[in-house]
Amino acid sequence: MDFTEVVTSRRSVHEYADEPLDDETLETIFENAIQAPSSYNLQPWEFVVLREDETKEALREAAYDQEHVTGAAASVIVLGNKDPEAHAETVADDMLEKGYLPNEEVRDSILENVAGMADLPEQERRVWTVRSTSLVAMALMHAAWDEGVATCPIGGFDPDAVLDAFDIDGEQYEPVMLMTMGIPAEDAGELQAEAKYRRPVDEVVHYEEFAPEREAPAVPADD
Amino acid sequence: MDFTEVVTSRRSVHEYADEPLDDETLETIFENAIQAPSSYNLQPWEFVVLREDETKEALREAAYDQEHVTGAAASVIVLGNKDPEAHAETVADDMLEKGYLPNEEVRDSILENVAGMADLPEQERRVWTVRSTSLVAMALMHAAWDEGVATCPIGGFDPDAVLDAFDIDGEQYEPVMLMTMGIPAEDAGELQAEAKYRRPVDEVVHYEEFAPEREAPAVPADD
């Protein structure tokens, strides 16, 4: 699909057709999604894809009983690894081999930087992983829609309940968001309604200086 | 451009041609980018676009003197608003009007939820805004590349120095990332090198349960 069509026609969908998502479709979607960039290319993301009734039901309980978690063909837990060093050597060696880094000294200094990041307080590592993992989450939603698969990102869930239900180590992994995925129902309301409001470009883009006051609603003149 | 081509051919580029980015091109790019979803559609993002030498120089100083900050036609400060209520009424009224919400009671309960989010500790609001703002940042990189404009996301910078240099209120706004943008140099190394390593889909996607141990490198058998 044309890129502009993907981004302008994508909607967050809650109503799905009763059609499964096969492995091949998911593979294609994830293969495109994981081309996303990340800090030092460290790719701190993991995805737990649930297609069985039992596991989707468990996730729904941790997501304040939102119906589409079980109604979708697949529900995904998007996890961020809070350990920057998890894949650092593989990534640094790759960049050296392919000429992105000039020599071993630069490779070593990158690994030192990453080790420094690993020493940061948990809170900073959390922000770090949420940033990179949200990049891939956006790419995942677009990659899905490019295959005709609708998604809905979910920020409203109990992270501790998700960790508990799926036996995930919360010391190392942050549940960044949940996402439902599936072929949309033919009459899915979101695909028929007018697109939701977007703050206009001339409100959100500031040139040369940050002037948020221009966002204030205009005060009507008295005369 | 075809979606798959956008995501597979995009690279983080450091070397840019000496060509300006005009307003119209930027408008097209941002118009596509801001179609990104966000928590409750609250769109907590702001972009400060710098094309003047003086402002790019100031940003470069806050970004540990990275050359491409001044070498790019535009450098962008991507900000996240830490106040979930900033645009809440506009967004909730829009969802009610377009039939995304069934009635005023649901609209009001959403505004109550958002007010509850606004009462969360700064650290939680920070994670919240980084999540939504990183979604739009990914869309921005893809939207730029669809217009032939390369980008490079930058996580390595001094956030306090950015706030200071551009007189931005750090109580309300989080510098989520920086981004350089421009037509790539004809001989930009990143566009000629082999794409950087990506952790394979079967390592990052887990079905039904989270089994990170499968990521461990295989131990060669002795025999």
Image (cartoon, coloured by chain):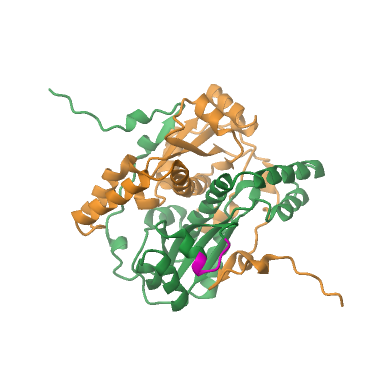
Chain colours: A orange, B green
Q: Nearer the viewer, residue A87 or B116?
A: B116
Give the image quarter of residue B215.
top left
* Residue A96 in picture, x, y percent from top left: 23, 53
Quadrant of image for the C terminus of chain B: top left
Please indicate, yes or no, whether residue B145 appears anywhere in the rendered image: no
For the magenta stretch, what is the residue range? B164-169
In this view, B203 is above or below B73: above
In this view, B85 is above or below B208: below
* Residue A104 in picture, x, y percent from top left: 19, 54
* Residue A19 in picture, x, y percent from top left: 56, 32
Q: Is residue B166 magenta?
A: yes
Please name the residue shown 29% across and 69% down the image: B187
In this view, A157 is above or below B100: above
Please indicate, yes or no, whether residue A163 appears anywhere in the rendered image: yes
Please name the residue shown 31% across and 53% down the image: B195
Q: Is residue B202 magenta?
A: no
Q: Is residue B55 left or right of residue A60?
A: left
Please name the residue shown 61% across and 34% down the image: A17
Please, what is the dominant secondary structure of the magenta stretch? loop
Q: Residue furthest left?
A: B223
Q: Nearer the viewer, residue B173 or B48?
A: B173
Q: Is residue A149 left or right of residue B58?
A: right
Q: Is residue A32 left or right of residue A2?
A: left
